[in-house]
Amino acid sequence: MSRLKKTKYLGKIKKTPSSPVDFELDSVNNPHPKSDYVVRLTAPEFTSICPVTGQPDFGIIIIDYVPNKLIVESKSFKLFLFSFRNYGGFHEECTIKIAKSVEKSIKPKWLRIAGFWNPRGGIPIDVFYQNGKKPKDIHLEDFKINTYSGR
């Protein structure tokens, strides 16, 4: 069986999508389907737009997942995240939308996401989601990021 499924984005020139609403993430076959291991996807410069003010919001998105049969194809994931740059959504909406899109695309055994958002109005908002209990006997690093701590 080939490791690569048919993909829309990998190896092709594509424009950045204007919205994440109808974006479908690409996936590829898990090269180690009989092993439980963690994949971490980190986006340290995530950007979206406040749906009320139209001002940019910035954050760090970290996704950890234990693959099942598929893994996220990274180019489509990058384009998916870029599609939020002009998308008006609150921090909670954007964070959970990302998680649900990954779940829909690859149906992982387990997934968690953390959205560490820079302050707006002096209040940083951090959003966390997890789809069940973490599988036993997997190594999982703590989040080691420099969150906003004031001036």
Image (cartoon, rainbow, N blue to C red):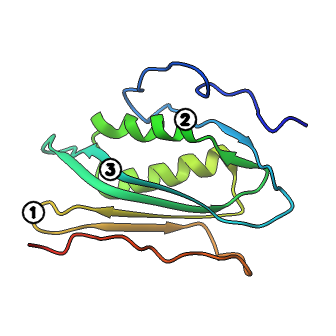
Please state which amino acid type lies under the numbered disc 2: Ser
- Residue at 16 percent of width and 69 percent of height: 123
* Secondary element at tag 1: loop
Q: Earlier in the sequence, mark 3 or mark 1?
A: 3
Pick the quarter of the image with the C terminus: bottom left
Q: Is residue 125 above or below residue 54?
A: below
Give the quadrant of residue 2: top right
For the residues marked 1 and 2, what is the alpha-carbon distance in whole angstroms? 33 Å
Q: Are marks 1 and 2 in contact (CB under 8 Å)?
A: no
- Residue 24 in the image, given as x and y percentages of width and height: 57, 34
For the residues marked 2 and 3, what is the alpha-carbon distance in whole angstroms? 16 Å
Mark seen at residue 45? 3
Please state which amino acid type lies under the numbered disc 3: Glu
Classed neighbour count for the residue bearing mark 3: other residues with Cα under 10 Å, few (<14), some (14–19), many (≥20): few
Question: Which is nearer the eye, 93 or 148?
Answer: 148
Pick the quarter of the image with the N terminus: top right
Q: Earlier in the sequence, mark 2 or mark 3?
A: 3
Please state which amino acid type lies under the numbered disc 1: Gly
Mark seen at residue 76? 2
Question: Circle 1 sits on which residue?
Answer: 121
- Residue at 47 percent of width and 39 percent of height: 78
Task: Please give left or right for residue 33 compared with residue 141 in the image.
Answer: right
